[in-house]
């Protein structure tokens, strides 16, 4: 992800999330690659249609933010992009990958569970929502023993 990509990324962020990240949050992550952050865009038919923001430390990877433009959803891009994120974590020698997802985001929960993530906790009233607050489901994926080829094969569409 480059600074020049931010307009496209923020446009997707603002339609994909109820509580979008600020431009500063993206810039801060982009400026922290030496501290274990990865910021990547998804390009499909020569246009940015998604992104992922990840961090890694102490053999733990965290999927901080991931989205595919809602107009491009349903093409399998999210599954492939999640596979890329898991592959990145494996390449970093992470043993576990964590994420949080809105409890009401049933499509994302299904995607993560189909990729092997397990529900390991609940953060009550974590996210702002249209009706007040919404819980976050904390999910984890055991990466020990996975190799990048295994991950790639399991996320093909």
Image (tube, rainbow, N blue to C red):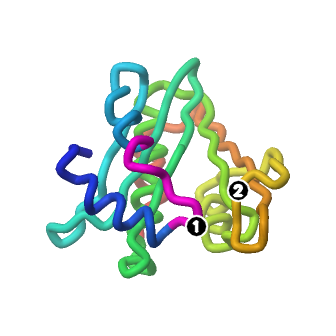
- Which span is picked out in magenta? 17-25
The numbered mark at residue 116 is none
Taking the spot 40% from the left edge, 35% from the top edge, the residue there is 29
Residue that extends furthest to the left in the rendered view of this protein: 46
Give yes or no for residue 23 being in the magenta stretch.
yes
The numbered mark at residue 127 is 2
Within 10 Å of disc 2 (Cα), the crowding (few <14, some 14-19, many 20+) is: some
Q: 91 and 107: which one is in front?
A: 107
**Does residue 12 appear left or right of residue 1 in this picture?**
right
Taking the spot 67% from the left edge, 69% from the top edge, the residue there is 105
SS type, badge 1: loop
The answer, for residue 156, to whether it is visible in the render is no
The quarter of the image holding the C terminus is bottom left
**Image vertical order of residue 76 relative to residue 125, above or below:** below
**Image vertical order of residue 4 relative to residue 24, above or below:** below
| For marks 1 and 2 on the same chain, the one whose residue lies earlier in the sequence | 1
Q: Quadrant of residue 114?
A: bottom right
SS type, badge 2: strand
Could you tell me residue 10's position as x and y percent?
A: 36, 59
Label 1: which residue? 18
């Amino acid at each position: 992800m480059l600074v020049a990509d931010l307009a496209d990324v923020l446009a997707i962020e603002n339609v994909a999330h109820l509580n979008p990240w600020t431009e500063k949050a993206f810039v801060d992550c982009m400026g922290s690659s030496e501290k274990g952050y990865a910021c990547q865009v998804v390009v499909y038919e020569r246009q940015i249609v998604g992104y992922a923001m990840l961090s890694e430390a102490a053999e733990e990877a965290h999927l901080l933010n991931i989205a595919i433009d809602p107009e491009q959803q349903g093409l399998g891009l999210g599954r492939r992009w999640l596979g890329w994120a898991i592959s990145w974590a494996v390449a970093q020698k992470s043993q576990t990958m964590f994420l949080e997802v809105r409890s009401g985001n049933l499509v994302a929960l299904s995607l993560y569970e189909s990729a092997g993530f397990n529900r390991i906790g609940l953060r009550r009233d974590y996210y702002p929502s249209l009706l007040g607050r919404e819980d976050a489901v904390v999910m984890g994926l055991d990466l020990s023993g996975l190799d990048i080829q295994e991950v790639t094969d399991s996320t093909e569409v």
